[in-house]
C-alpha cells in the first residue's frame, strides 16, 4: 500500500487509484511526495511583453521560442499576452494576472517601470528577462551588455580604429543604455573621448532615419558600433549608398547575432547572446522563486561572445 500511496513507479494508475480510495475509506492519512518535475507539471506560468517586443522577430521572437521550449521541457503550461500601449499607460493587467490564474510570471524586456510595478503588486512570483530597473523589485536574467559592447569596441580599437561612432536609441531600452556605457568604457580606457556628433544615441531603427543621420555628418568615423544588428544592417546599406566600401573604408559591428548580421553583404561582426541559455536560466530561476518565495532578489548576468565576420577590418590610415 505504501508504494501506491507514495506515488512510486511500478504501480499502475488504476491500481494506485483503487488503493488510495480504499485507504481514504479506512481513514488512512498520508501525504504523497511529489518530485520537482511533477510540481512543475502542475504549474501555469504567464509570459507578457509589450506589443513592440513581440514584433521584434530577429531577437525576441527567437527568445520567445526558446522560453516556450524550456517551459514545455519542465511540463509548464505557458499563457501568453501582449501588452498594448493603451494597457501599459492605463495600467490594465492581463486577465490571467488580475484573476491570479498563474503561479508565476515571466516579463520579456521592457514595458514600463510603472506597469511592471503594478504587476509585481499582485504578489505573483516574477522574473524579468533582459530587463531590470532599480525601482522594479524582482529577479532578473540579463545580458552583460556593458562588457559585450566593451569587447566589440575593443575589437575595433585593436584593428587600429580610433574614430569610432555609435548608433542606436538609448531611450528604447536599458540594454541600449548599457551598451553605450560599454562603448564609452572601451574608448576612454584608450584615452579617447568620442565627439558628440559621432554618438547617434537617439536614432530610430529605420532606414530613412539612419540614411539621414549618416548623410548629415561632416566627418565620418572609420568604424561604427551599432546597438543591435538591425542598426548595423541599415548602417552598412547607408554607407554603401554613400560610396564607402565595407570594411576597406569603414568597419561596422552589431549586437545580438540576429539574422540581420548574416543577411548583410558583407556579413556583420556581432555579439552573440545565447537565447537558449537565457530561457533555461529564467525558467529555472522562476521555479526556484516558486519554491523559495522569501529568498533575496537575484540578478543573473549572462555572458556574450564576440563573433568576428567580414564587416570589420584594419584601419586603412584614411586612404
Image (cartoon, rainbow, N blue to C red):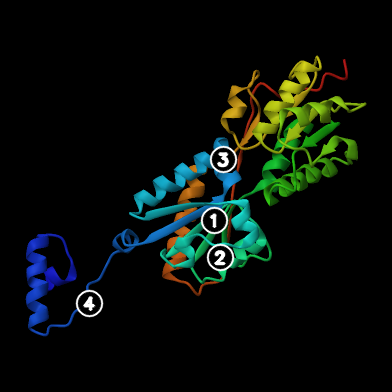
**Nearer-N-terminus badge (4/1):** 4
Residue 31, disc? 4
Distance Cα–Cα, label 3 vs label 4: 46 Å
Q: Are marks 3 and 4 in contact (CB under 8 Å)?
A: no
Query: Where in the figure is residue 21, as x and y percent of width and height?
Result: 9, 74
Query: Where in the figure is residue 7, as x and y percent of width and height?
Result: 18, 66
Residue designated by label 1: 107
Residue designated by label 2: 119
Q: Nearer the viewer, residue 55 or 76?
A: 55
Distance Cα–Cα, label 2 vs label 3: 22 Å
Distance Cα–Cα, label 2 vs label 1: 10 Å
**Nearer-N-terminus badge (4/2):** 4
Residue 249 vertical position relative to residue 274 in the rendered view, above or below:
above
Residue designated by label 3: 55
Give the residue drawn at x 64%, y 24%: 309
Name the quadrant containing residue 4: bottom left
**Nearer-N-terminus badge (3/4):** 4
Q: SS class of the residue under badge 2? A: helix
Amino acid at each position: 500500500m505504501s508504494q501506491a500511496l507514495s506515488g512510486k513507479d511500478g504501480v499502475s494508475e488504476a491500481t494506485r487509484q483503487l488503493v488510495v480510495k480504499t485507504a481514504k475509506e479506512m481513514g488512512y492519512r498520508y501525504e504523497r511526495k511529489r518530485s520537482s518535475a511533477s510540481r512543475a507539471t502542475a504549474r501555469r506560468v504567464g509570459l507578457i511583453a509589450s506589443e513592440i517586443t513581440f514584433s521584434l522577430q530577429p531577437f525576441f521572437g527567437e527568445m520567445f521560442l526558446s522560453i516556450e521550449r524550456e517551459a514545455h521541457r519542465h511540463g509548464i503550461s505557458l499563457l501568453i499576452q501582449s501588452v498594448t500601449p493603451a494597457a501599459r499607460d492605463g495600467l490594465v493587467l492581463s486577465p490571467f494576472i488580475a484573476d491570479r490564474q498563474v503561479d508565476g510570471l515571466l516579463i520579456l524586456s521592457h514595458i514600463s517601470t510603472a506597469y511592471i510595478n503594478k504587476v509585481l503588486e499582485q504578489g505573483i512570483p516574477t522574473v524579468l528577462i533582459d530587463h531590470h530597473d532599480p525601482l522594479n523589485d524582482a529577479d532578473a536574467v540579463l545580458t552583460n551588455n556593458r562588457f559585450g559592447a566593451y569587447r566589440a569596441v575593443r575589437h575595433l580599437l585593436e584593428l587600429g580604429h580610433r574614430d569610432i561612432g555609435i548608433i542606436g536609441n538609448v531611450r528604447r531600452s536599458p540594454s541600449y543604455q548599457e551598451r553605450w556605457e560599454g562603448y564609452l568604457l572601451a574608448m576612454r580606457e584608450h584615452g579617447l573621448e568620442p565627439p558628440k556628433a559621432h554618438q547617434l544615441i537617439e536614432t530610430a531603427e529605420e532606414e530613412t532615419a539612419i540614411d539621414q543621420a549618416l548623410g548629415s555628418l561632416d566627418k565620418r568615423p572609420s568604424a561604427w558600433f551599432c546597438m543591435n544588428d538591425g542598426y548595423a544592417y541599415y548602417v552598412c546599406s547607408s554607407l554603401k549608398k554613400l560610396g564607402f566600401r565595407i570594411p576597406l573604408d569603414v568597419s561596422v559591428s552589431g549586437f545580438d547575432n540576429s539574422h540581420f548580421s548574416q543577411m548583410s553583404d558583407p556579413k556583420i561582426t556581432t555579439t552573440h547572446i545565447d537565447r537558449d541559455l537565457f530561457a533555461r536560466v529564467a525558467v529555472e530561476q522562476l521555479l526556484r522563486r516558486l519554491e523559495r518565495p522569501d529568498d533575496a532578489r537575484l540578478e543573473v548576468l549572462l555572458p556574450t561572445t564576440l563573433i568576428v565576420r567580414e564587416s570589420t577590418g584594419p584601419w586603412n590610415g584614411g586612404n
